Image (tube, rainbow, N blue to C red):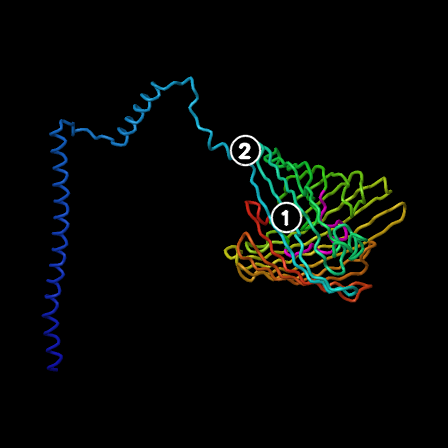
Amino acid sequence: MRIILLLMLFGCWLVPFTAVAQERERTDSLEQEVRKLKAQLDSLQRILERLVSEGQDTTEVRDELAALRAAAQAAAAGVQAGADTTVPQESRTRDLSLTNPEISVTGDVVGYYTVPAEGLNRAGAVPREFEFSFQAPLDPYTRTKIFAAYHQDVPIAGLPDSHGHGEGEGGEEDEEDGHGHGGAFEIEEAYVYWVGLPGAFGIKVGKFRQEIGLYNRWHTHALWEVDRPLPYQVFYGEGLMQTGAGLTFPSLTLGPSTQTLIVEATAATNEVLFGEGGDMSFLGRFQSFWDLSPAMYVQVGASGVYGRNRDEELTSRLGQVDLAFRWAPPNRSLYTAFHLKGEWYYGEKEIAGEKETGKGTYLQLNYRANRRLTFGARGDYVYGFEHLLDTYQVVPSITWWQSEWLYIRLQYNFVKSKTLQGNHTMLLQVVWAIGPHRHENY
């Protein structure tokens, strides 16, 4: 009880002491505010005395910013009054770059080691592609793109080259160069296209990679593997690139999907599909794009090509369907992503009344593990036409991006056909680019 009474007495003594301390702190704070206000008032008083001593009117509010603007306008008027307006006074130094196109250069070198089922092992390296890109606006309504490239086929055991010749079928020239895949320089694309047309139509004229499949529009250096899928090589070589015109109709949006229709009319000059020389060919493509979520989309498409070569009494037809799925978190797409793509082809050729058919398909997986490292795998199958009968191919690959301008890829190709038990090829690819074109995808 004594202890309790002592604590109560101490508490009664402490409460008024605490209240006094808080009141003193509040008083000190108010005194500081009063001192600040007094200092500001003294400063304003000194300014007012200076203005009065200079004879300025302090009874009106003056807008200092307006006064400065008025003074600047008066000075500018005085300068213009004394200038010679008969001579144009303008600089065109900034216009010099407007007349120059955007120029890019891409290099693509591949080293290989082949182990064919029949024949000798071979090793070497080829300058697979050196591409020069020129892009520029012509006026507010048109743009142009020109791609000139040197190409050389990469030898893969068991597969034909881009001209449809099988491995080792090139004749005497094959024996001289050691691999039978000579290089060539060509204008890969050179076309003009219109933008901002009424009704959102799109038109392009010239030589261009046509709208068939998922990868025909992609340039070689931007592919996910060293080589294109096997059906591409069998049905139209390294790409369907012909001269003519293309029309893209306005996209139609239905709920979460967008529909696109494209038609093209070109000269039938693709050697693999139409032989040497031809008449006209026609292409149509329909594709539907679906947004499933902010991180996922699906695209389905179908294409058809028809063309004739009267000199060889050849009529060619090619049909194609494709499916593409992509998953990539919106804020992490540079670090992780997954792609699944596949296509199916059916080709038909009538030569002097005799019909020849072929079919092919592929499935491709691509996974980005981080910003630098990407893993890929592709499986191909073709049957028909004269060069490949019942042929399979498996293609795993690893790609390391040193930067946006350079990547290195290691790839393995295993090819097995009805006549050959197994062909093995190891490929090491280095691709680099300068300029704004870099590694353009479509």
- Identify which residue, 173 or 245, lies in the foreground: 173
Seen from this angle, which residue lies furthest front? Answer: 176
Label 2: state its secondary structure. helix
Q: Residue furthest bottom?
A: 1
The residue range painted magenta reads 224-241
| Quadrant position of the N terminus in the picture | bottom left
**Sequence-first tag of 1 and 2:** 2
Q: Is residue 14 left or right of residue 132?
A: left
133 lies left or right of 174: left
* Type of the residue with mark 1: Phe
Element type where label 1 sits in the image: strand
In the figure, 2 relative to 344: above or below?
below
Residue 367 horizontal/vertical position (percent): 59, 61
The residue labelled by disc 2 is 99
Residue ID at (13%, 41%): 41
Q: In the drawing, does residue 70 fall left or right of residue 413? A: left
**Image label count:** 2
Q: Which residue is mark 1?
A: 130
Q: Counting other residues with Cα less than 10 Å from the Cα at mark 2, is it few (<14), some (14-19), or many (20 or more)?
A: few
Q: CA distance from mark 1 to mark 2?
A: 25 Å
Q: Is 39 on the left-hand or right-hand side of 248?
A: left
Nearest the viewer among 29 and 77 is 77
The image shows residue 172, relative to residue 284, as above or below, that is below
- Give residue 332's position: percent from left, percent from top: 51, 57
Picture coordinates of residue 223, whole percent (x, y): 64, 53
Residue lying farthest right? 353
